[in-house]
Amino acid sequence: MTSETITAAASGTWKLGDLEINRIGFGAMRLTQNGAAFAADATPSDRDRATSVLRRAVELGVNHIDTAAFYFSPLRSANELINRALAPYPDDLVITTKVGPGRAPSGEWLPHATPEQLRGQVEENLRQLGRDHLDVVNLRIVGTDSIADRFGALAQLRDAGLIRHLGISNVRPGHLAEARAIAPVVCVQNPYGIGARPEQDELLRACQEHGVAFVPFYAVAGAGREAGASGVESDEVLAVARAHGASAAQVRLAWTLHRGPHVLAIPGTGNLDHLAENVAAGALRLSEDELTLLNSLHGGTA
């Protein structure tokens, strides 16, 4: 499929609270380094190329960028690249960030933040991005423990005006109800794509029921996670790709967007050509037969 003139508007829109965005966004995780994200031996990305990708994303209608203060490699910070490339920010640009995890300057992972430490993480994001408030902050967690204390701490920062909207990331279905009992939740960010575990479909449906955006990560990479896609693709995905003159990655993104009007996509790249392809995936319309074929890989139709 032709990608040069397709913008993110082709994907349709959704609202994060009162902030309307195009459903195809941009994830900054892979922007700071060459190779796998967070790898100890990662080489820093080229600064000019990274800023060019960010500026081109906005030119292509991307108005939702996902980032975090812990997205960095030697010499490169995703937040500071975003600040350098895009400030003063367009009025319609929504920047979503995450707190909870932390990394030492050496790159080593630190214990997840306590409720008392979350304010410092929020303030670090504010400093790096050059903002006086954050549009959306996701509490990212690991495990099944209660999130009430940590989400409650973020709700207090929201009440103080440092945060506009709240979300949760890497959670289980029960966490959504727990968070919603404390403060409004505008998005859930979880691993999701063709072949995801059944509990992720349960969470996707719960989000739709409550008008909450479901924001998959690893929609293209799948089991490759931080390392990216493996390059080995199923016959079913390749068949649909050939029928549309599209790439396998575009088909995977399109399938994800077809899961519901509340489903967003935040594919990331440091390559201008891949950026255009990712944005163009928002215009790819799959037939019912194609969806049935791809759903057979996923394990159902729900």
Image: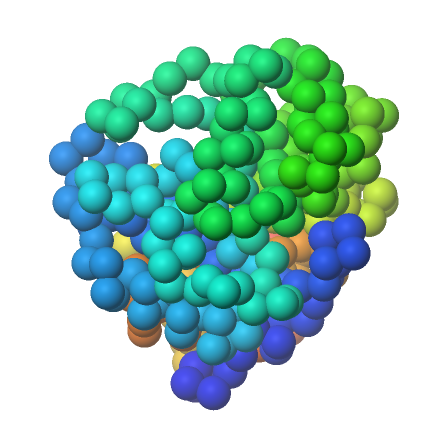
Image quarter in which the N terminus is found: bottom left
Percent position of residue 119, x then y = 58, 25
Decide which of 46, 14 is in the foreground and name it.
46
Query: Could you tell me if residue 119 is visible in this image?
Result: yes
Which residue is at 28% across, 54% downward? 231
Residue 99: x %, y % from top left: 53, 31
Whether residue 294 is visible to the viewer of this picture, yes or no, is: no
Quadrant in the rendering for residue 273: bottom left
The residue lying at 69 percent from left, 14 percent from top is 149
The residue closer to the viewer here, 296 or 283, is 283
Q: Position of residue 52 (x, y in %)?
A: 32, 69
- Res 20 quadrant in image: bottom right
Closest to the observer: 290 or 246? 246
Residue 183, horizontal then vertical, whole percent: 81, 31
State left or right for residue 89 relative to residue 81: right
Question: Does residue 278 appear left or right of residue 98 in this picture?
Answer: left
| Horizontal arrangement in the rendering, residue 48 relative to residue 269 (left or right) | left
Residue 65 appears left or right of 209: left
Q: Measuring 48% from the left and 59% from the top, which residue is drawn there?
A: 26
In this rendering, is residue 272 above or below 234? below
